[in-house]
Image (cartoon, rainbow, N blue to C red):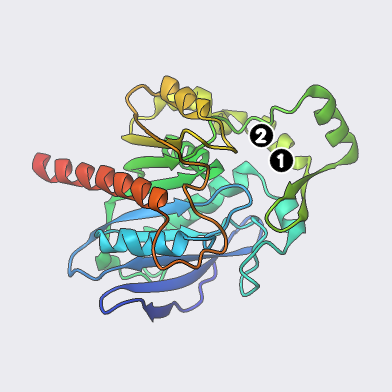
Amino acid sequence: MIRRPGRTAYLSRMLRTVEFTLTGPAHGRPFAADATWQPAGQPQPVVVFVHGFKGFKDWGHFGLLARFFAEKGFVFIKLNLSHNGVVVGGTGDLEDLEAFGQNNFSRELDDLGQLLDALHTPGATPLPAEALDLTRLYLLGHSRGGALVLLKAAEDPRVAAVATWAAVASLHPRWPAEVLAQWQRDGVLHVPNARTGQQLPMYYQIAEDFYKNRARLDLPVLMPGLRQPILLLHGDQDETVPLDAVHQLHAGQPAAEVVVVAGAGHMFGGAHPWAGPALPAQAQLVAERTAGFFTGLGLRKEVTT
């Protein structure tokens, strides 16, 4: 792991953010993360946010999300998954399409695990250890990132709770047999990025990775075994991940809390770039519900200890 010195910026009188870089030991690719918090003189619960497919940590309104959660008393950490196409020190948008094509679900879980390891290792990040209450380590994921945080909770007992926004219900590559066969023959399948006009490559290795590591990646099988508190939020007008996905996840884990947001699409009102000074109204709503969920867990913990 390689770390560069954290760059500290003051977002307001009391709010701080630091940026840092990790490097995956298996693939050697650096990836960036940042943390935002409001110093309070005591440890604060930690929320790690994971973006989705074609997403990145600084997409749209995600910077405003960091500020929102920090002002609610959390240390909010967001990361670029190592093979999402963003380059450390680059444009901040998807530009390394070869890396994007070499992404797979195991790498994404390993990246998230590496970040959690770093948070538990003194000196591995520029975050002051005294600011972190790692007994209240919460994961939050959007879209495919929602599936990833649920999978990480299934394998990592350090995760105290999980919230998902517009999560997919499975990572299974459910393309028709003829599409999979053609993909295997060609070695690559291209998917459009409507926002940029790019044709994004996906090498067949992502399907191979799923089948090779299915015991680790099969969310419908693992979902019933989750013991952490779970909050599942989904818009009833989601144009990307059908609303049925949240019902599938809930069927696998009936103890989870479900919130369906009326009129909300996949990004809860957000877009990239986002020039507004405030969160989109629907994003504000899901952020409020999520912060309240995590805060309530902390309050119950204090009562019982």
Figure quadrant of residue 30: bottom right
Q: Position of residue 241 (x, y in %)?
A: 57, 35
Q: Nearer the viewer, residue 161 or 284?
A: 284
Q: Is residue 156 in view?
A: no
Q: Quadrant of the N terminus?
A: bottom right
> Does residue 85 sit above or below 152 in this rendering?
below
| Crowdedness near tag 1: few (<14), some (14–19) or many (≥20) residues, C-alpha within 10 Å | some
Q: Secondary structure at mark 2?
A: helix
Q: Position of residue 64 (x, y in %)?
A: 41, 63
Q: Which residue is mark 1?
A: 206
| Crowdedness near tag 2: few (<14), some (14–19) or many (≥20) residues, C-alpha within 10 Å | some
Q: Say which mark, if any, is on residue 210.
A: 2
Q: Residue at x 49, y 45 (%)?
A: 142
Whether residues under marks 1 and 2 lie with C-beta atoms below 8 angstroms apart, the answer is yes
Q: Quadrant of the C terminus?
A: top left
Q: Residue at x 40, y 59 (%)?
A: 279
Amino acid type for the residue under numbered disc 2: Phe
Q: Residue furthest right?
A: 185
**286 to the left or right of 22:** left
Marker count (numbered): 2
> Does residue 173 sit above or below 221 in this rendering?
below
Q: Is residue 56 in view?
A: yes
Q: Residue at x 44, y 77 (%)?
A: 6
**217 to the left or right of 212:** left
Q: Residue at x 51, y 35 (%)?
A: 237
Q: Say which mark, if any, is on residue 70.
A: none
Marks 1/2: CA–CA distance: 6 Å
